[in-house]
Image: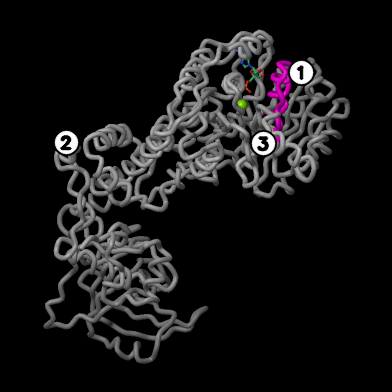
């Protein structure tokens, strides 16, 4: 019987109600149960002499009851003292019955399992599990560590453990679990078989190696865990490969017309492209000529000039009679792009369209009409661009900025916008934050990668200071001095709350306070709740130099560009991720003057926070910072709340298992080429048929 097709109701004790609870854990088949791995283990394979029990650990002890009595402390409880050859320990119960107490007669032998605490009477076990041991019973200890599974309300641990036990008992008897990694490959990798790994993880055997096993298991580094993590990573890699293959089967517009528009555009720019920009632009140009969809990731540190490269790609589409759509994750960033693209492209005689969720009524209708009749050639907007009711006349290229805030699913949804059963638009994905190599190799494995690894000339490294908010006056003095010397400054407010309203309020309060302390400076305020016209009025005044200090929420993270600003103060930087801080800091250091970023933290600062902020002080390299951010915070946090598919890993951990990733890449290639049916089976097993990142 195939385990993926065997329903859970095959097991003893599973009726509709238990099945529903299992369903809530995403457990639908016997195979799912087998892959439902323990969170941790309890060691009940050996007895711990009472005298050697350590507080804070869990222990299995056995002893003779001395007495059981009810005590009346702050809470009524029953205390039962037991003794072995090495010491005495008390079992404490807050919920108990008279019958229970009566059964605990002096002289009875008990075996108990629980967490050892330091209580009033010395060592205590609170509400331990216990059983009676009879003299002539040959009471044996379990031969395995006891697994503790993730479970859900209404499904007891012991129940779930029993069900998984049933599944394991049937494994290799009535149920076969096929190992889709061919033996020859498995052996070169030094892995055990799939079944061995699964059985081990559910039932790690007692014995001499138990200490080291427990330790490795707790760290997620046991060979069996690595074996499964490898296969899971492999499945994701293969799935992305499959998506890619499906996409490149389709046709895309062949954008081969001569680059007159692009030449004109470049000659208008006040600077020449950097070598890196030119190289990446050429890579994109070559892709767009091919007639198969481009799937390319464009990476570059903050300020490396990705937008211009994107504009060149858009022009290539327009030159060939197609539209290009540019999507950004926030309203403000989208607005910035809209302004940039309008300034660049309107002089060339093009029309730039605009769409965001806030655009309503007649204006919205007019915009939508211009997308449909192709009177807008380049269209900029937020994710509103891929909502229903938005149609394009002939979308040839999709550019997505700030990729890691969009999930894989959204990327695919937009891809479908301009798609037909035979055609797909080209796709360029830009990240504002560099993606660490291991992530790029896994989460973005369906994309080709281009890197702008050079900043435009004339940038100065930003000096970063980490200062306690007890020195706020010094910081204000610094602003005063910088502005007295003709520079401009930013003051960035962050807030604990996710609430935008509170964040904006905090910025307002700060702006008022700073106005009092710095009466001779012209101070402006910008936050996400202001109307677009108000915001752009403030931003323009700051750009013109009419404002010297700009107080802002993190909305200025992206897209603001004022070379004369040379000082940035970030309040409570400990609340933001490193990548985001680096992004913010990239707003200064764009002009000739030496720039500074002051990270003004709320003291005291935790140890990790100190460690994190020092990464920023030490480095200006976005790739290095992203890598450290990933290591410190883990992939879920790093990728943001709107996670990509990859953050949904069950067993593997992109940081812990980073060393596996190059091998995963290599083996995925081999399987894809030489064992396609195995590759498909691995995708199905781990990711399922329905959930393959949408239906691209
Ligand atoms: P990012 O990669 O962070 O998105 P942008 O595209 O916003 O960077 O560019 C940052 C700034 O650098 C912009 O003001 C842009 O006009 C400018 N810039 C881009 N390329 C060059 C270049 N080759 N030389 C000088 N300045 C450039
Ligand atoms: Mg940018």
Mark linked to residue 487: 1
- Residue located 31% across and 41% down the image: 234
Which residue in the protein does label 3 denote?
A: 372
**Label 1 beta carbon less than 8 Å to ligand 1:** no
Nearer to us: label 2 or label 3? 3
Marks 1 and 3, the one that precedes in the sequence: 3
Report if the CB atoms under discs 1 and 3 are less than 8 Å apart: no
Residue 345 in the magenta stretch? The answer is yes
- Front-lying residue, 260 or 525: 260
**Residue 61 in view, yes or no:** yes
Left or right position of 659 against 636: left
- Residue located 50% across and 39% down the image: 420
- Residue located 67% across and 44% down the image: 495
- Front-lying residue, 183 or 585: 183
Looking at the rendered structure, the secondary structure element under dot 3 is helix
Q: Residue 313: percent from the left, percent from the top?
A: 57, 21
Marks 2 and 1, the one that precedes in the sequence: 2
Q: Residues within 10 Å of mark 1 (few under 14, many from 20)?
A: many
Q: Quadrant of the C terminus?
A: top left
Mark linked to residue 188: 2
Q: Is residue 133 above or below residue 651?
A: below
Nearer to us: label 2 or label 1? 2
Left or right position of 502 against 13: right
Marks 2 and 3, the one that precedes in the sequence: 2
User: Which quadrant of the figure shows ligand 2?
Assistant: top right
**Label 3 beta carbon less than 8 Å to ligand 2:** no
In this picture the colour scheme is one colour
Q: Residue 172: percent from the left, percent from the top?
A: 15, 61
Could you say which quadrant of the image residue 544 lies in?
A: top right
């Amino acid at each position: 019987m195939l385990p993926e097709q065997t329903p859970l109701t095959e097991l003893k004790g599973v009726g509709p109600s238990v099945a529903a609870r299992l369903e809530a854990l995403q457990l639908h088949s016997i195979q799912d149960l087998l892959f439902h791995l323990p969170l941790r283990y309890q060691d009940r394979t050996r007895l711990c002499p009472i005298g050697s029990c350590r507080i804070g650990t869990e222990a299995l002890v056995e002893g003779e009851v001395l007495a059981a009595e009810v005590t009346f402390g702050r809470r009524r409880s029953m205390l039962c003292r037991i003794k072995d050859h090495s010491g005495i320990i008390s079992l404490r119960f807050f919920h108990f019955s008279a019958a229970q107490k009566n059964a605990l007669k002096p002289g009875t032998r008990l075996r108990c399992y629980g967490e050892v605490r330091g209580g009033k009477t010395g060592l205590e076990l609170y509400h331990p599990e216990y059983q009676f041991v009879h003299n002539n019973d040959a009471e044996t200890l379990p031969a395995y560590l006891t697994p503790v599974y993730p479970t859900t309300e209404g499904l007891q641990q012991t129940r779930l453990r029993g069900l998984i036990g049933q599944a394991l008992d049937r494994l290799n008897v009535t149920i076969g679990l096929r190992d889709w990694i061919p033996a020859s490959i498995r052996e070169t990798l030094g892995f055990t078989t799939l079944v061995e790994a699964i059985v081990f993880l559910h039932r790690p055997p007692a014995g001499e190696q138990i200490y080291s096993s427990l330790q490795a298991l707790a760290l997620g580094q046991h060979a069996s865990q690595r074996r499964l993590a490898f296969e899971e990573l492999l499945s994701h890699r293969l799935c992305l490969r499959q998506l890619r293959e499906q996409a490149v089967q389709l046709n895309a517009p062949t954008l081969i017309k001569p680059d007159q528009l692009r030449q004109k555009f470049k000659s208008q720019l006040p600077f020449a492209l950097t070598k890196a920009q030119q190289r990446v632009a050429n890579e994109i140009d070559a892709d767009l000529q091919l007639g198969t969809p481009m799937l390319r990731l464009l990476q570059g540190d903050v300020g490396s000039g990705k937008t211009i490269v994107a504009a060149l790609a858009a022009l290539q589409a327009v030159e060939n009679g197609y539209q290009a759509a540019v999507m950004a994750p926030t309203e403000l960033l989208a607005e910035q792009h809209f302004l940039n693209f309008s300034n660049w492209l309107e002089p060339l005689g093009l029309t730039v369209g605009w769409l965001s969720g806030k655009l309503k009524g007649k204006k919205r209708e007019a915009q939508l009409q211009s997308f449909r009749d192709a009177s807008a050639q380049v269209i900029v907007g937020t994710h509103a661009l891929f909502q229903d009711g938005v149609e394009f006349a002939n979308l040839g290229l999709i550019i997505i900025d700030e990729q890691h805030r969009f999930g894989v699913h959204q990327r695919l949804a937009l891809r479908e916008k301009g798609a037909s059963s035979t055609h797909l638009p080209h796709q360029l994905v830009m990240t504002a934050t560099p993606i660490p190599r291991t992530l790029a190799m896994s989460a973005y494995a369906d994309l080709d990668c281009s890197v702008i690894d050079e900043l435009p000339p004339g940038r100065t490294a930003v000096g970063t200071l980490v200062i306690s908010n007890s020195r706020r006056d010094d910081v204000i003095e610094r602003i005063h001095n910088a502005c007295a010397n003709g520079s401009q400054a930013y003051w960035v407010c962050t807030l604990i709350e996710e609430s935008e309203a509170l964040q904006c309020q905090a910025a307002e309060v700060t702006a008022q306070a700073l106005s009092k302390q710095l009466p001779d400076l012209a101070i402006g305020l910008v936050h996400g709740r202001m109307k677009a016209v108000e915001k752009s009025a403030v931003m323009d005044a700051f750009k013109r130099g009419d404002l010297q200090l700009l107080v802002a929420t993190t909305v200025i993270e992206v897209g603001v560009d004022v070379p004369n600003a040379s000082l940035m103060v970030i309040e409570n930087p400990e609340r933001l991720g490193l990548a985001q801080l680096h992004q913010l800091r990239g707003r200064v250091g764009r002009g000739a003057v030496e720039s500074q970023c002051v990270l003004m933290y709320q003291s005291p600062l935790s140890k990790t926070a100190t460690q994190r902020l020092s990464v920023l002080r030490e480095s200006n390299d976005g790739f290095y910072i992203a890598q450290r951010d990933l290591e410190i915070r883990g992939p879920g946090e790093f990728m943001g709340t709107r996670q990509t598919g990859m953050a949904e890993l069950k067993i593997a951990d992109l940081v812990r298992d980073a060393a596996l990733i190059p091998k995963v890449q290599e083996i995925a290639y081999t399987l894809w080429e030489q064992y396609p049916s195995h590759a498909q089976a691995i995708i199905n097993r781990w990711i399922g048929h329905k959930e393959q990142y949408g239906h691209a």
